[in-house]
Image: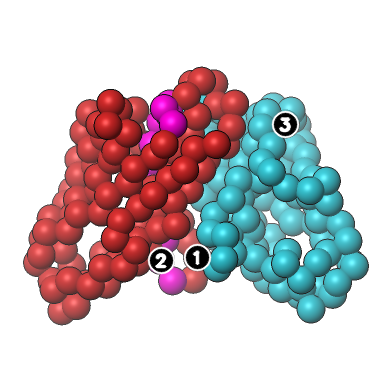
Amino acid sequence: KAGVTQTPRYLIKTRGQQVTLSCSPISGHRSVSWYQQTPGQGLQFLFEYFSETQRNKGNFPGRFSGRQFSNSRSEMNVSTLELGDSALYLCASSYLAGAYNEQFFGPGTRLTVL
Amino acid sequence: KNEVEQSPQNLTAQEGEFITINCSYSVGISALHWLQQHPGGGIVSLFMLSSGKKKHGRLIATINIQEKHSSLHITASHPRDSAVYICAVRGGSGGGADGLTFGKGTHLIIQP
């Protein structure tokens, strides 16, 4: 069974631009969560989606948004990029949403904002 | 908001040593995860616990819900165990009103 895939793996943008990252979950998994990892703040939760609905959202500004499609694939979008948005963005999928479901992580998208 | 503290932050040990990494949290939780992250960023889920103890190969994870504390043990450590180990917790509602809250990680180096 294929793992979680994320595209692109690396991305360089400039301040003010917007970016869209994509995540394809493990086949059969219906929940996708997104995380941001930076050297200063570590790992932080962004969003959780299940069956095309956002269930949870972390403490990030409205510039960060996401969605999930009917095939469970998910995208996240960051508008008006800032230097501080440079990070590794990870997505994870699980069969169901909620606390008792093991999450499987993708390799991440490394975003650099210049 | 749950505060997750891990100790130690850095640990260097010799091959074969018994390793313990600790995690404490401030608010009751539904579940606790132990994750492993190798250089390059890939994260692997090692354990998910809501009570008691789990074992997988040379890895053992325990949780004490009353004391809000969990430990990850590695027996007969090996250089390939070198990685960052991250503790993460999920809120007490069970349904997961919040996403995961992460510790800062423990950077483990096992020397041959």
**Chain (cyan):** A
Distance between mark 1 and mark 3 Cα atoms: 26 Å
* Image point (35%, 53%), residue name: B6
Which is the main secondary structure of the residues drawn in magenta?
Answer: strand
Residue A1 location (% of width, % of height): 48, 45
Residue A52 location (% of width, % of height): 74, 30
The residue identified by callout 1 is B41
Image height check: is A16 above or below B35?
Answer: below
* Image point (89%, 66%), residue name: A17
Residue B17 location (% of width, % of height): 10, 65
Left or right, A84 with reference to B103: right
Q: Residues within 10 Å of mark 3 (few under 14, many from 20)?
A: some
Tell me the quadrant of the picture where the N terminus of chain B can be found: top right
To the question of a shared chain for discs 2 and 1, the answer is yes
User: Hey, which quadrant is residue B27 in on the image?
Assistant: top left
Query: Can residue B55 be seen from the camera position used here?
Result: yes
Distance between mark 2 and mark 1 Cα atoms: 6 Å
- Specify the segment rendered in magenta: B27-39
Quick one: SS at disc 3?
A: strand
Mark 2–mark 1 contact, CB under 8 Å?
Answer: yes
Q: Chain of mark 3?
A: A
Quick one: SS at disc 2?
A: loop
Distance between mark 3 and mark 2 Cα atoms: 30 Å
Query: What's the amino acid at mark 3?
Result: Gln
Q: Residues within 10 Å of mark 1 (few under 14, many from 20)?
A: some
Q: Which mark is residue B38?
A: 2
Residue A41 location (% of width, % of height): 57, 60
**Chain (red):** B
Image height check: is B43 above or below B28?
Answer: below
Query: What's the amino acid at mark 2?
Result: His
The residue identified by callout 3 is A54
